[in-house]
């Protein structure tokens, strides 16, 4: 196990993985409480279009993913107001637009390449120093935002109408949470992969909720579950030479299953 840490690319992968394990549950808890689990999928497809744009026009794909994720987040909130009675339609529209743009641009770029596959399914070796710097900055924004706004975000997650009546800037908070989700997708995509980011937003939180603890404890437990999944997932993927994203997600799902089994056993006693 120690051997893996001797290589610089593995050191970068673990640093990136720890950031993913912290930021995903921090945002995922509010997404789950607001019943917006699909928003991770939506913004990940928007970020894929950004990655494809970067590869097609020759700029850093990370910037493309970031720009398209933020645009997607703003568009979702705009569409939610337009389709107020059918708010979930906004996710489907942006997801469709994102995957459509991605497919067209990938076609114009003459198909897939190794870099694109790394963004889609995660890669240990692909994480570079520039990625770490951007991920660190985005992670700090996410962490400090949650620390400062967690009470208000918790309030709108449980009682949006009550928050509105109390004078909170609900529209701004909803938009900011969606933007933070987009930033989290960008942070996680290099390790977990664009297609599996939403799993890391939801599954560790789902497992933590089953423990029946309070809000703050649930956040800490979900981060611990995510850290276990990421650290062991990276180690397993290194030694078995398999995709880290799929390995991490499968471990996360395994933790959820174990938690559910333990909970069922306790109920029977």
Image (tube, rainbow, N blue to C red):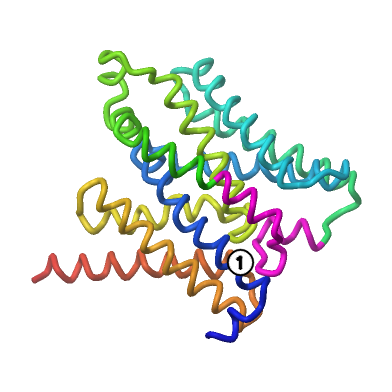
Give percent across and percent down for residue 106: 83, 47
Give the farthest residue toward the left: 269
What is the total number of numbered labels drawn onto the structure image? 1
Residue 215 in the figure: left or right of residue 139? left
Q: Is 212 placed above or below 31 here?
A: below
**Residue at horizontal 74%, vertical 60%?**
117
Give percent across and percent down for residue 227: 43, 64
Residue 216 in the figure: left or right of residue 5? left
In the picture of the structure, the residue carrying the numbered disc 1 is 13
The boundaries of the magenta stretch are: 114-138
Give percent across and percent down for residue 232: 48, 74
Q: Quadrant of the C terminus?
A: bottom left
Q: Give the image quarter of residue 169.
A: top left
**Residue at horizontal 21%, vertical 65%?**
263
Residue 135 sits inside the magenta stretch: yes
**Residue at horizontal 38%, vertical 20%?**
170
Q: Is 111 placed above or below 50 here?
A: below
């Amino acid at each position: 196990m120690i051997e893996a840490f001797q290589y610089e690319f593995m050191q970068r992968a673990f640093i990136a993985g720890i950031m993913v394990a912290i930021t995903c549950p921090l945002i995922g808890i509010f997404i789950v409480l607001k019943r917006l689990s699909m928003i991770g999928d939506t913004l990940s497809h928007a970020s894929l279009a950004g990655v494809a744009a970067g590869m097609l026009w020759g700029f850093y794909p990370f910037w493309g993913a970031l720009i398209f994720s933020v645009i997607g987040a703003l568009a979702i909130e705009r569409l939610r107001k337009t389709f107020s009675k059918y708010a979930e339609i906004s996710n489907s529209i942006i997801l469709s637009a994102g995957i459509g743009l991605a497919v067209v641009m990938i076609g114009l770029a003459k198909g897939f390449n190794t870099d694109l596959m790394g963004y889609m399914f995660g890669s240990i070796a692909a994480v570079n120093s520039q990625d770490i710097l951007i991920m660190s900055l985005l992670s700090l924004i996410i962490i400090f935002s949650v620390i400062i706004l967690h009470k208000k975000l918790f309030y709108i997650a449980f009682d949006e109408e009550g928050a509105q009546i109390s004078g909170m800037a609900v529209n701004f908070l909803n938009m900011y949470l969606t933007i933070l989700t987009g930033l989290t997708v960008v942070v996680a995509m290099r390790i977990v992969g664009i297609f599996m980011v939403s799993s890391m937003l939801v599954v560790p939180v789902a497992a933590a909720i089953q423990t029946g603890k309070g809000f703050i404890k649930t956040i800490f437990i979900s981060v611990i579950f995510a850290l276990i999944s990421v650290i062991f997932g990276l180690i397993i993927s290194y030694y078995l030479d398999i995709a880290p994203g799929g390995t991490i997600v499968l471990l996360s799902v395994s933790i959820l299953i174990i938690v559910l089994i333990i909970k069922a056993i306790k109920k029977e006693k």
